[in-house]
Image (tube, grey):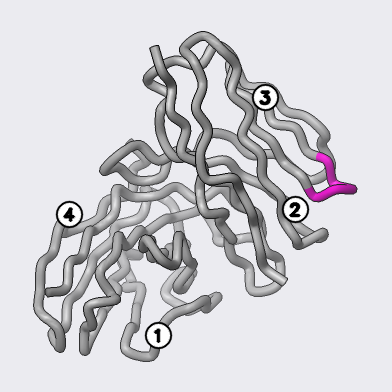
Amino acid sequence: GEDVEQSLFLSVREGDSSVINCTYTDSSSTYLYWYKQEPGAGLQLLTYIFSNMDMKQDQRLTVLLNKKDKHLSLRIADTQTGDSAIYFCAEFYNQGGKLIFGQGTELSVKP
Amino acid sequence: DSGVTQTPKHLITATGQRVTLRCSPRSGDLSVYWYQQSLDQGLQFLIQYYNGEERAKGNILERFSAQQFPDLHSELNLSSLELGDSALYFCASSAAGGAGETQYFGPGTRLLVL
């Protein structure tokens, strides 16, 4: 089946780390993505991870992948107010060749 | 800036009408995707084209159609519009439309049906 689940809201203090979680269903997914959407804007690709990796780090972003549990997380270190946005997890669904998105997690960063 | 352009940015129309949304992919990208983002349905894949041919189909209504032209730009046609079609419509592009390729999204067209 095609289903990607995320919690809807996360609130953190500026300077703290944020962890956004995602679960997916297609065990054959080859790529998993994180996109950011700021208010009134389009989707911006943040990072992605290939399914044969457990972890990927890119500056303040760390992606962890647990294939056994089909769990993906995005950690943002030293979260800033400019990180406030909606974060979407997406898996590439091999049947039909399409991206399946989660509902998005709204991250609110308080000063 | 992703390099994907979409026009118009905003569109307001009435029920029963027909509209056309336009997308130009990133330079060199052969594949174009259309997505719909609405409050109740979230972000959903509609359809994919590769070099002028339909490649994959998602939750696209029969009232909607799309095409990709020889210059690789794409148009999404929405007809017999209903209130529920009000949404943000995104176009994305990728190099060759292959499995797992990174898709770069345009800024979207916001459609309001009154």
- The chain to which mark 4 is attached is B
Q: How crowded is mark 2: few (under 14 residues within 10 Å), some or many (20 or more)?
A: some
Left or right, B15 with respect to A42, comes to left
Mark 1 and mark 4 on one chain: yes
Q: Residues within 10 Å of mark 1 (few under 14, many from 20)?
A: few
At a point 39% along the width and 18% down the height, the residue shown is A81
- The circle drawn on residue A12 is none
Mark 3 and mark 1 on one chain: no
Decide: marks 4, 2 in contact (CB < 8 A)? no
Could you say which quadrant of the image residue A18 lies in?
top right
For disc 2, the marked residue is: A30
For disc 3, the marked residue is: A62
Report the Cα–Cα distance between label 4 and label 2. Answer: 33 Å
> What amino acid type should be assigned to the residue bearing mark 2?
Thr
Horizontal and vertical percent position of residue B11: 13, 64
Report the Cα–Cα distance between label 2 and label 3. Answer: 18 Å
At a point 30% along the width and 60% down the height, the residue shown is B88
At a point 63% along the width and 68% down the height, the residue shown is A97
> What amino acid type should be assigned to the residue bearing mark 4?
Lys
Q: Considering the whole magenta stretch, tell me its main secondary structure.
A: loop
Q: Quick one: quadrant of the N terminus of chain A?
A: bottom right
Report the Cα–Cα distance between label 1 and label 4. Answer: 22 Å
Q: How crowded is mark 3: few (under 14 residues within 10 Å), some or many (20 or more)?
A: some
Q: Residue B38, relative to residue B47: is it above or below?
A: above
Q: Quick one: quadrant of the C terminus of chain A?
A: top left
For disc 4, the marked residue is: B9
Q: Is mark 1 on a helix, strand or loop?
A: loop
- The chain to which mark 1 is attached is B
For disc 1, the marked residue is: B61
Given residues B19 and B85, the one toward you in this image is B85
Give whichever of discs 2 and 3 has the lower sequence position.
Answer: 2
Report the Cα–Cα distance between label 4 and label 3. Answer: 33 Å
